[in-house]
Amino acid sequence: MSRPETEKIIGIDLGTTNSAAAVMEAGRPVVIPSAEGQTAAGKMFPSVVAFTKDGQMIVGEPAIRQAATNPEGTIREVKRKMGTADYKVRIYGKEYTPQQISAFILQKIKRDTETFLGRPVKKAVITVPAHFNDNQRQATKDAGEIAGFQVERIINEPTAACLAYGLDKGDKEMKIMVFSFGGGTHDVTLMEFGGGVFQVLATSGDTQTGGADIDNAIVEHLLTEFQRQTGINLRNDSAAMTRLKEAAEKAKIELSSLLTTDIDLPFIASDSSGTKNLHVTLTRAKLEDLAGPIVRRVEAPIRRTLQDAKLEPNAVDRIILIGGQTRMPLVRKFVEDIVGKQAERGVDPMECVAVGAAIQGAVLAGEVKDILLLDVTPLSLGVETLGGVATKIL
């Protein structure tokens, strides 16, 4: 008689800009393809939810495609608002919490995974930025439960990346710096790995700095150039702003491998003399000039993490970069210059968080053994005594 099949626990990277899931199949983690096929982010799909005027809900790549004609019904980057108690999105007379919007993204992941595996999926491990506080972590767990998942564990994104990295390198002891720079957040985590055990030494970060800020800097540059050329201010035109945001992100991605790119947006505005087209040539040098102040913000968390772990930069054995923004040459060089060594090239920065979460799911399901995860909270713990005085314990 054949043994009953172990119930799968999938790993989910619920990202600010893009999301993905992975599952352990035949002993190897496999990234679940989105139903719409490959996107600019590979097998990931955009973390975008849209509502049409007739009440239809759209998630992922189709939501991005209709955003220019329905900007008021399109929601992006809701992860930045997770855990904000009184924040609600109001669309066409209805209100939604960040947890509900995130749940719509997670429901798409659930549907895509069930289609891929050919059977129902109930359990998941979901990742969060290392610097998320308790409210943000609880909001993520709530979103999973609204989507119909039994959330087995919430783990830190850098921890998940280390699981993806360490699975095949179990015989080496090393200190690893995981630098995460995604669409909406960035954090730095120092981990010690040896004997199949991962231990977080220190973590620091910023939940309000990410690649979207670089996109916004490019948009501001395009707005200024267009106004200089035509005298027209597009800032209050929501459809034009949506098109500019999409073009800015596309140009930023292209300039990771090219030195120059053209941004062409025909019929973006009109005045008494007729329609106006936007044409701007953006160079990598100009992009780095615009992105520089944002990228420099990541230095303080790197220094703080090294200080908290009581390590010098030369004590770091490996650097792992995660998040789409780390594909930008400026970001990679900035981190490498601070630490004084090259970052690893063998880890896909876009997929490794979902892969690591799938490995953790397989550990919890009993599919993978010989890995033990010791994590630390990035926040202080304490007690509040009479009179409202808080005493820090850890």
Image: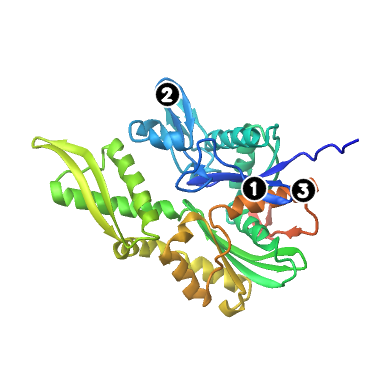
Colour scheme of the picture: rainbow
- Mark 1 is surrounded, within 10 Å at the Cα level, by few (under 14), some (14 to 19) or many (20 or more) other residues, namely some
Q: What's the distance in space between the residues labelled 3 and 2, CA to CA?
A: 42 Å
Task: Give the left or right position of residue 74, taking residue 97 as reference.
Answer: left
Which residue lies most toward the right here?
1
Q: Is residue 388 visible?
A: no
* Residue assigned mark 2: 93
Q: Give whichever of discs 2 and 1 has the lower sequence position.
A: 1
Q: Position of residue 233 (x, y in %)?
A: 20, 44
In this rendering, position of residue 262 left or right of residue 323: left
- Decide which of tag 3 and tag 2 comes sooner along the chain: 2
Alpha-carbon span between mark 2 and mark 1: 40 Å
Report which residue position mark 1 lands on.
Answer: 30
Q: Circle 3 is placed at which residue position?
A: 364
Q: Quadrant of residue 292?
A: bottom left
- Quarter of the N terminus within the rendering: top right
What amino acid does circle 3 point to?
A: Leu
Q: Inspect the image, locate mark 2, and give the three-letter code of the amino acid beneath it.
A: Gly
- Spot occupied by residue 90 in the image (x, y as percentages of width and height): 43, 30
Please tell me which residue is depicted at 34% across the width and 64% down the height of the picture.
Answer: 288
> Helix, strand or loop at disc 2?
loop
Residue depicted at 65% across the width and 61% down the height: 165
Residue 186 in view of the camera:
yes
Amino acid beneath label 1: Val
Q: Secondary structure at mark 1?
A: strand
- For discs 1 and 3, the disc positioned in front in the rendered view: 1
Which mark sits nearer the N-terminus, 1 or 3? 1
**Considering only vertical position in the picture, is 325 above or below 138?**
below
Which secondary structure lies at badge 3? helix
Q: Residue at x 72, y 47 (%)?
A: 361
- Mark 2 crowd level (few <14, some 14–19, many ≥20, 10 Å Cα): few
Q: Label 1 near label 2: C-beta < 8 Å?
A: no
